[in-house]
Image (cartoon, rainbow, N blue to C red):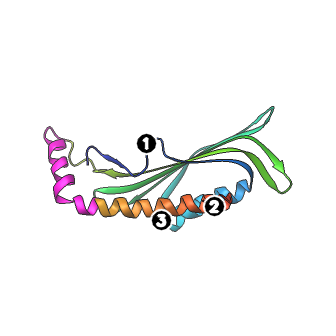
Amino acid sequence: FKGNEDYITPKEGTRIIYNGDFDFNKLCSTIKSWYRSKKFIMAEKEYTIKDKPLGKVAELAWQGERKQDTYTKFKVNIFMEINEMKKSGKLDNGNMLIRFVAYLELDYKKKFESKHGKFMQDIYNNYLIRKKLKDYEDKLGDELTEIYNNVKEQLELYS
């Protein structure tokens, strides 16, 4: 454990790439209700839909955080980009990229921000609370898997 961010996913995120029919509103509400059910404080950082010649382009970004204790926060950010989005009957159709980024934010109160703080933080993270941080990684990983699978299920991507 080095620094203040411990990524569960790659930094660029775990991805779902999809091309086909989907229910845009249902997908967004699935994501939002997952954040609520896991007691994350969620912020919609971006929500833009633009008309383009080949269809709409949508860009959405949600950021969620939840305090685990006085040292650690769970962070889950979800980014959705849809190109060539058009209505297809009652559904929407388009090319979609969804990225899920999850990490632990450590020392969010900045208690280790002194000259020797980073050294002390490394000892704290890697020896004193290593087991607890590993348990947090597993828990956040399980929660991320849940929303990832919920989205895949909604897109009918069974693998």
Q: Which residues are magenta?
A: 114-133
Q: Is residue 56 left or right of residue 115?
A: right
Q: Position of residue 159 (x, y in %)?
A: 60, 59
User: Is residue 48 in view?
Assistant: no
Compared to 52, does 121 lie above or below?
below
* Magenta span contains residue 11: no
Q: Position of residue 17 (x, y in %)?
A: 62, 46
Q: Magenta region, mostly helix, strand or loop? A: helix
Q: Are marks 3 and 2 in contact (CB under 8 Å)?
A: no
Tell me the element at label 1: loop
Q: Is residue 57 left or right of residue 12?
A: right
Q: Position of residue 132 (x, y in %)?
A: 26, 63
The residue at 84%/51% (across/down) is: 88
The residue at 13%/41% (across/down) is: 116
Tell me the element at label 3: loop
Q: Is residue 11 left or right of residue 28?
A: left
Q: According to the image, label 1 marks what residue?
A: 11
- Three-letter amino acid code of the residue under disc 1: Lys
Q: Position of residue 109 (x, y in %)?
A: 28, 51
Q: Which mark lies nearer to you, 3 or 2?
A: 2
Q: Residues within 10 Å of mark 3 (few under 14, many from 20)?
A: few
Q: Which mark lies nearer to you, 3 or 1?
A: 1
User: Is residue 108 in view?
Assistant: yes
Q: According to the image, label 3 marks what residue?
A: 39
The residue at 47%/41% (across/down) is: 12
Residue furthest top as drawn: 53
Task: State the image quarter where residue 23 is shown.
Answer: bottom right
Q: According to the image, label 2 marks what residue?
A: 158
* Magenta span contains residue 132: yes
